[in-house]
């Protein structure tokens, strides 16, 4: 094996120069990067090499020699071990600067001259998540809820999840205790046996309604009626209890089939004054307070006057579409998950919105068809998953040539790539506005308007 600049178990004193997009400290040893979990830029640390590869090494933070002024006391070790809150040791204002700077660096690399505004953050950057999906496993012979340790499937028992709505934490414990009481077994990944795999809980920030989903390997859960009654009695906010069947050997949390056990088969919540129904399989933004900030930014930046034809690609349950429909002539949404499209249509009806319609399909395929048919739009709104826009989607925009593309992004790397691709069609952006949807984590959300 070729010699690496540092060796496993070596201890060396280094100065941290940067943070990776995963929130790890980076120190360079003669240009060779050392990734140190928990270390912050500006700090001098003693690093203990855990793994040395040809081009980089991972090290453990053995000792802090000097401390960054941005360092704060972490809430609990578990949040670093599980990766629930990988930035918990970084002061919140510094987290916001870190996110802004990540986009600045990516734009620089892509030779994009776009101003990145300061990240819009939260007043209380914890307890914000409206959704939890916690794994359920047997630990010491007992059904236990918690979270996986980083880069593993070892369950760390956990009761307070810090970044989740505390009412959700409480609900998980109620469900856990009932499952224990009735002797229901937890799933075992190695042997592919046992019953309960995950508990998913969603809670409406405004509605305060709760949906509880038991993800199970079987429809036949012992004492199911008693458990359902127990949950609804202990948690009066419960508006829906669902059973999701997942009997495949997979890391995907939810299976395709869901059955209603109690109440409605959807959860209701409000955003910017509209009401939304959310099915268990539909996407719904996890930080409701910041979602309103994000959408408001997108709507303001789209500069709608009431006359525009808008396409909302990756429209989910229609939250952006229906909010924009109030300020536009018409909105056409496209989304790949049929349940979400059904929710979006239902949501239009529920809010008395008649100028929005939705189709099920791949955004790239449907955009290509629309462009080929000569359909026009004034604004194309996109909110793709982490992998960003498909090349076919960009090509279809290049054919349709809407005056404005409003890009909501949850991954600045693919955002920079897609902006570069859209530049080929004469689009340019002036500003990007980051909005912190995921405090204490490294995820970065932003809004950018591109114009021709
Ligand atoms: N705009 C919505 C949803 C954004 S999340 C909101 O803010 O709530 C991204 C959405 O894109 C998800 O609903 C996902 O199901 C959908 N999606 C993923 N790949 C897609 C594709 N190729 N075509 C259309 N929709 C897709």
Image (cartoon, rainbow, N blue to C red):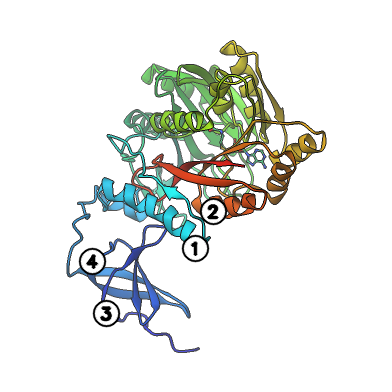
Instruction: Give the foreground label among 3 and 1.
Output: 1
Instruction: Tell me whether the residue at label 4 lies in contact with that at label 3, contact meaning CB atoms closer than 8 angstroms.
Output: no
Q: Is residue 270 visible?
A: yes
Provide the secondary structure element on which disc 2 rests: helix
Residue 218 percent location from the top left of the image: 61, 35
Provide the secondary structure element on which disc 3 rests: strand
Instruction: Tell me whether the residue at label 2 lies in contact with that at label 3, contact meaning CB atoms closer than 8 angstroms.
Output: no
- Disc 3 packing (10 Å; few <14; some 14–19; many ≥20): some
Instruction: Tell me whether the residue at label 2 lies in contact with that at label 1, contact meaning CB atoms closer than 8 angstroms.
Output: yes
Position above or below: 152 against 383: below
Residue position marked by numbered label 2 in the rendering: 416
**Whole-number angstrom distance, CA of label 2 to CA of label 1:** 9 Å
Q: Nearer the viewer, residue 41 or 327?
A: 327
Residue position marked by numbered label 4 in the rendering: 43
**Whole-number angstrom distance, CA of label 4 to CA of label 1:** 25 Å
Q: Nearer the viewer, residue 385 or 435?
A: 435
Q: Earlier in the sequence, mark 3 or mark 1?
A: 3
Picture residue at 40% right of the left edge, 33% below the top: 290
Instruction: Tell me whether the residue at label 2 lies in contact with that at label 4, contact meaning CB atoms closer than 8 angstroms.
Output: no
- Disc 1 packing (10 Å; few <14; some 14–19; many ≥20): few
């Amino acid at each position: 094996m070729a010699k690496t600049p540092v060796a496993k178990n070596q201890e060396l004193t280094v100065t941290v120069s940067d943070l990776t997009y995963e929130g790890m400290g980076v120190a360079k040893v003669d240009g060779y990067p050392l990734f140190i979990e928990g270390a912050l830029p500006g700090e001098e640390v003693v690093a203990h090499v855990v793994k040395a590869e040809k081009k980089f090494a991972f090290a453990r933070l053995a000792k802090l020699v000097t401390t960054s002024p941005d360092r704060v006391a972490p809430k609990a070790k578990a949040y670093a071990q599980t990766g629930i809150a990988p930035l918990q040791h970084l002061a919140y204002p510094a987290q916001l600067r870190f996110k802004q700077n990540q986009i600045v660096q990516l734009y620089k690399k892509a030779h994009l001259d776009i101003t990145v505004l300061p990240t819009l953050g939260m007043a209380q950057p914890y307890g914000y998540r409206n959704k939890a999906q916690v794994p359920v496993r047997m630990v010491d012979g007992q059904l236990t809820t918690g979270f996986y340790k980083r880069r593993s499937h070892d369950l760390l028992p956990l009761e307070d999840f810090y970044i989740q709505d505390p009412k959700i934490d409480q609900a998980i414990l109620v469900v856990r205790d009932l499952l224990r009481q009735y002797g229901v077994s937890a799933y075992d990944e190695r042997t592919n046996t046992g019953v309960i795999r995950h508990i998913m809980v969603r809670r409406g920030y405004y509605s305060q309604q709760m949906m509880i989903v038991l993800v199970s390997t079987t429809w036949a859960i012992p004492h199911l009626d008693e458990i359902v009654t127990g949950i609804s009695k202990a948690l009066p906010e419960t508006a829906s209890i669902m059973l999701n069947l997942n009997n495949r050997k997979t890391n995907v949390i939810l299976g395709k089939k869901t059955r209603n056990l109690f109440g409605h088969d959807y959860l209701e919540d409000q955003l910017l004054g509209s009401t939304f129904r959310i099915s268990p399989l539909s996407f719904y933004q996890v930080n409701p307070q910041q979602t309103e900030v994000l959408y408001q930014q997108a709507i303001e930046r789209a500069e709608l006057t009431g006359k525009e034809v808008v396409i909302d690609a990756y429209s989910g349950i229609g939250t952006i579409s229906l909010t924009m429909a109030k300020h536009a002539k018409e909105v056409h949404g496209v989304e790949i998950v049929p349940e979400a499209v059904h929710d979006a249509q239902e949501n239009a009806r529920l809010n008395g919105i008649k100028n929005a319609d939705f189709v099920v399909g791949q955004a790239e395929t449907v955009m290509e068809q629309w462009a080929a048919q000569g359909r026009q739009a004034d604004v194309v709104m996109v909110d793709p998953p982490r992998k960003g826009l498909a090349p076919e989607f960009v090509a279809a925009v290049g054919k349709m040539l809407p005056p404005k593309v409003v890009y909501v992004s949850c991954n600045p790397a693919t955002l920079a790539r897609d902006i570069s691709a859209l530049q080929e069609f004469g689009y340019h952006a002036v500003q990007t506005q980051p909005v912190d949807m995921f405090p204490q984590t490294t995820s970065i959300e932003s809004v950018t308007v591109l114009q021709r």
